[in-house]
Image (cartoon, rainbow, N blue to C red):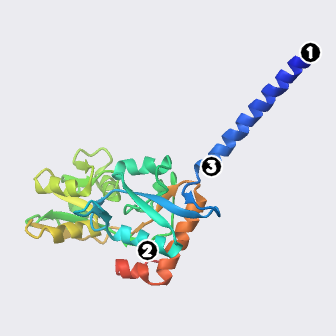
């Protein structure tokens, strides 16, 4: 083999090796997000949400994203000494936004479930909720089992959707899976569903803000407590640890209880 050929062969091997190593490095970097300062510490995080879930997250008259979840994240950011920027993605697009690191984490009343933990990492819980049934005022529904053969409106791919599928079956044509919870409730108000099932805070907020709408809530002890967490890209330990530090801080100083009205263990 000539010297020239040997050099070309060696160059090709080194190039192949460098590409493999670059590929390995990219995989590690893909899980790291956040804007860092000169010292390498995170100074800013982009936050994704679905601002259609009052009182947890919604848009005010000026177009600002507000709500209990937002107040909690703001309190966490203040404790950590970092800046946060919110982006309204909607519920379904929120998950791929975290996957593709368009956002550093998501806050949107996201219940921590075993299924979601297979694809994402979650912080420690910061909020406790449960499902609540909303029906017309003259409805005879008394518990969740009464919905077995009725038309039920839910927000798609939420825990309300999941528990209703558990009751009626995943392929039930009686389940009206709608893009947002307000639209799911509207579906019921318009007579296209017999009930709506959703997180208690959101259902109660709707009833409070619409006193002239003839509806009532139905509680059921069979609904298990649900714990909300901040959702990050799987493997993003740096942001996960930072957020957990902030959550613990607002628990310890009482700010979390001040915002939510209760302790979260």
Residue 37: x and y, percent?
59, 62
Image side of residue 1 versus residue 51, left or right = right
What residue is pinned by disc 2? 75
Nearest-to-viewer mark from 1 and 3 = 1
Looking at the rendered image, the quarter that the N terminus falls into is top right
Q: Residues within 10 Å of mark 1 (few under 14, many from 20)?
A: few
Q: Residue at x 23, y 56 (%)?
A: 148
Q: CA distance from mark 1 to mark 2?
A: 68 Å
Question: Which structural element holds mark 3?
Answer: helix
Mark 1 or mark 3: which comes first in sequence? 1
Q: Residues within 10 Å of mark 2 (few under 14, many from 20)?
A: some
Q: Is residue 201 visible?
A: yes
What residue is pinned by disc 1? 2
* Residue in the foreground of this view, choosing between 38 and 20: 38
Residue 79: x and y, percent?
50, 76
Residue 59: quadrant of the picture: bottom left
What residue is pinned by disc 3? 29
Q: Residue at x 67, y 39 (%)?
A: 23
Q: Are marks 3 and 2 in contact (CB under 8 Å)?
A: no
Hey, which residue is sitting farthest top in the picture? 1
Q: CA distance from mark 3 to mark 2?
A: 28 Å
Residue 130: x and y, percent?
33, 68
């Amino acid at each position: 083999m000539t010297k020239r050929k040997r050099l070309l062969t060696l160059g090709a091997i080194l190039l192949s090796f460098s590409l493999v190593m670059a590929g390995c490095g990219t995989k590690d970097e893909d899980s790291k997000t956040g804007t860092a300062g000169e010292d390498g510490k995170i100074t800013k995080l982009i936050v994704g949400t679905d601002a259609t879930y009052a009182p947890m997250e919604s848009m005010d008259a000026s177009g600002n994203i507000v709500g209990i979840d937002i107040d909690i994240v703001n309190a966490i950011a203040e404790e950590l000494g970092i800046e946060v920027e919110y982006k309204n993605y909607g519920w379904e697009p929120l998950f791929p936004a975290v996957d593709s690191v368009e956002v550093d984490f998501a806050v949107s009343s996201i219940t921590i479930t075993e299924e979601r933990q297979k694809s994402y990492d979650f912080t420690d819980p910061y909020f406790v909720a449960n499902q609540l049934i909303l029906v017309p005022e003259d409805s005879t529904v008394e518990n969740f089992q009464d919905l077995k053969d009725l038309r039920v409106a839910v927000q798609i791919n939420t825990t309300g959707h999941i528990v209703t599928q558990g009751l009626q079956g995943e392929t039930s044509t009686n389940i009206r899976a709608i893009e947002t919870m307000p639209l799911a409730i509207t579906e019921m108000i318009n007579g296209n569903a017999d009930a709506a099932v959703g997180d208690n805070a959101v259902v109660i907020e709707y009833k409070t803000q619409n006193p002239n709408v003839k509806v009532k809530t139905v509680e059921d002890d069979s609904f298990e407590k649900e714990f909300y967490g901040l959702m990050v890209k799987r493997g993003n330990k740096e942001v996960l640890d930072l957020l957990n530090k902030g959550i613990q801080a607002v628990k310890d100083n009482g700010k979390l209880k001040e915002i939510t009205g209760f302790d979260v263990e």
